[in-house]
Image (cartoon, rainbow, N blue to C red):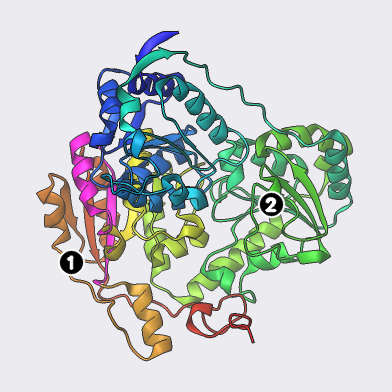
Amino acid sequence: MSNMSGGEALVASLVKEGVEVVFGIPGIHMSGIVAAMRDEPSLRLVTTRHEAGAAHMADGYARVSGKPGVCLVVPGAGLYNAASGLATAYARSSPVLTIVGQIPRNLIGKGLGAVHEVVDQAEVVRPVSKWRRQVLRPRDIPDAMTEAFRQMRTGRPRPVLVELPPEAGVEREEVTLRDPAPVSHIVPSADDLRRAVDVIMESRLPIIYAGGGVAQSNAEALLVRLAEETNIPVVTSSGGKGTIPDDHPFSYGSCFGPRAEMDEMNQIYEVLASADVVIGIGARFSMGNPAGESSTLININIDDSELTRVQSNTIPLHGDAGATIEALLPLLAEAGAQDRPSPEEAVEVTKRLIAHYDIRDEEPQYPILEMMWNTLPEETVIAWDVTQFGYYARSHYRVNRPKTYIDSGYSFNLGYAFPTAMGIKVARPDEPVVCVTGDGGFMFNATELATAVQYGINIVTVVFRDNAYGNVARDLHNYFGGTYGTELRNPDLAQFAESFGAVGLRAGDPQDLASLLPEALSRNAPVLIDVPLTDISLPPAKMFRGQAQPPWTMPQEGLIDS
């Protein structure tokens, strides 16, 4: 036991859990914690300009570091501001710890209007968090912190929250610190594994569908081994992009993107739909299994609520992706899976067809993305914002390194990419990190340029500028007879960046990125590249699951009860 303040106990607990950086704002309710951070040399506080930025940075840090990200926010409005970042982390199953203040202990729940009061504050983020706990005194902090990290490291990783009143950070009492809780990987039973092996060995056209759970389990190398040692090809979800190199001869690429909305032209989708056995690994199958009940779904997932949700004809394997693959490999080898014929020729034919369709469409995004792929180092980590380029990157941008493709998942949080890329750079300071965004999304968190300059977070931000919320404008024009409220007035973005002390560069044309990206990466500073899109019109929205136009543009059956 040691006599410690609550702030000291919390900081000591973070250090025991291996935390090196916290993103956040040192508000008055958090003074005891902030003072303890100041006095701990192994812990760094990156002060952000908005709580949303702090949460996004913690998410970006977590996604590429293999460790939980931590953000610190004030109660009430601070937690509301952070909630958008937590929603993205939740959608991408990212382990983010939010440490949030509270109002004074004797006022909690009274509804008297204390500064920053929100009654039932933790309930604000219940839909986008896995676990929450309120701590009222110093001696209870180590237990809460140990459990918070255990929750993030076991099962499906998602955001968690610990809240404490200001006096708990400064009061002192005898405290017993705890070591990190041991973590055991869940592995399905031997009988279930053998049943899955039997089905795989009897299959005619099996395929692996790899989701984000592979990356969260750090099982990318095991996935490649599984494909190579069984000769079973791989399709990835957008969350699984990068878990197998796109240039691997057994990799079809990512299924979902603009092409996935046009079933008759999406060769990858057709291949997946024709499989008689689909081996899902760490995937939610949010749009269902394309092969449906005509196939057997072997569903490997750490989240037991996902195991049988997709279809009835399922063999559920409840387990960690990496540990389950590792347990399957010797059983498959024993059964002779290595003798299956190689799918390399079929994969290559499909890839050529996809390339043909890309060229035929002559859509301007493709040559720009191709140029960027040829220009940037292969190890570059790119956070793609919710833009046309982000949509096309899901299926077209080639990714050959694990954890180098970052998107917003189903939250589609416009503007998330810039602060998320900053968190990525803090985790990977020696690797190139790029944010690709639009002018609308960039301005959501543009003030974090100050944070980037202050802490030397040297990312390159490519802003494709059309002075509009372009996707919304297109749909309003195409389906509702005209745009409204979508035009934007922007600052001179290069000068805007320079006003913070960053480097501002200008492109005359998107193809100028071929020279500007290497120049930007050579600068030892945060760099913004302003890329005008005045001569590039957005393509029409693609067909969505067989519909002639996007579902948000027309009435849907079943939305209104009779």
What element does badge 2 sit on? helix
Q: Quadrant of the N terminus?
A: top left
Left or right, 220 with reference to 490: right
What element does badge 1 sit on? loop
> Which amino acid lies under the numbered mark 1 shown in the image of this protein?
Asn
- Please tell me how crowded label 2 is: few (under 14), some (14-19), or many (20+) other residues with Cα within 10 Å: some
Is residue 444 a member of the stretch shown in magenta?
A: yes
Residue 430 visible at all: no
Is residue 246 a member of the stretch shown in magenta?
A: no
Of the two numbered discs 2 and 1 in the rendering, the one whose residue sits closer to the viewer? 2
Give the quarter of the image for residue 41: top left
Q: Name the residue located 29 percent from the left edge and 21 percent from the top edge.
A: 36
Q: Are marks 2 and 1 in contact (CB under 8 Å)?
A: no
Residue 444 visible at all: yes
Residue placed most toward the observer, 204 or 277 = 277
Q: Name the residue located 64 percent from the left edge and 68 percent from the top edge.
A: 267
Q: Name the residue located 83 percent from the left edge and 48 percent from the top edge.
A: 200
Residue placed most toward the observer, 478 or 258 = 478
> How far, Cα to Cα, is label 2 from label 1?
43 Å
Left or right, 245 with reference to 447: right
Give the quarter of the image for residue 442: bottom left
Q: Give the residue at the far bottom of this rendering.
A: 481
Q: Position of residue 330 (x, y in %)?
A: 80, 32
Q: Earlier in the sequence, mark 2 or mark 1?
A: 2
Q: Which mark is residue 306?
A: 2
- The part of the chain drawn in magenta is 443-467
Q: Which mark is residue 490?
A: 1
> Which amino acid lies under the numbered mark 2 shown in the image of this protein?
Glu
Residue placed most toward the observer, 384 or 509 = 384
Q: Quadrant of the C terminus?
A: bottom right
Q: Position of residue 180 (x, y in %)?
A: 53, 21
Residue placed most toward the observer, 556 or 477 = 556
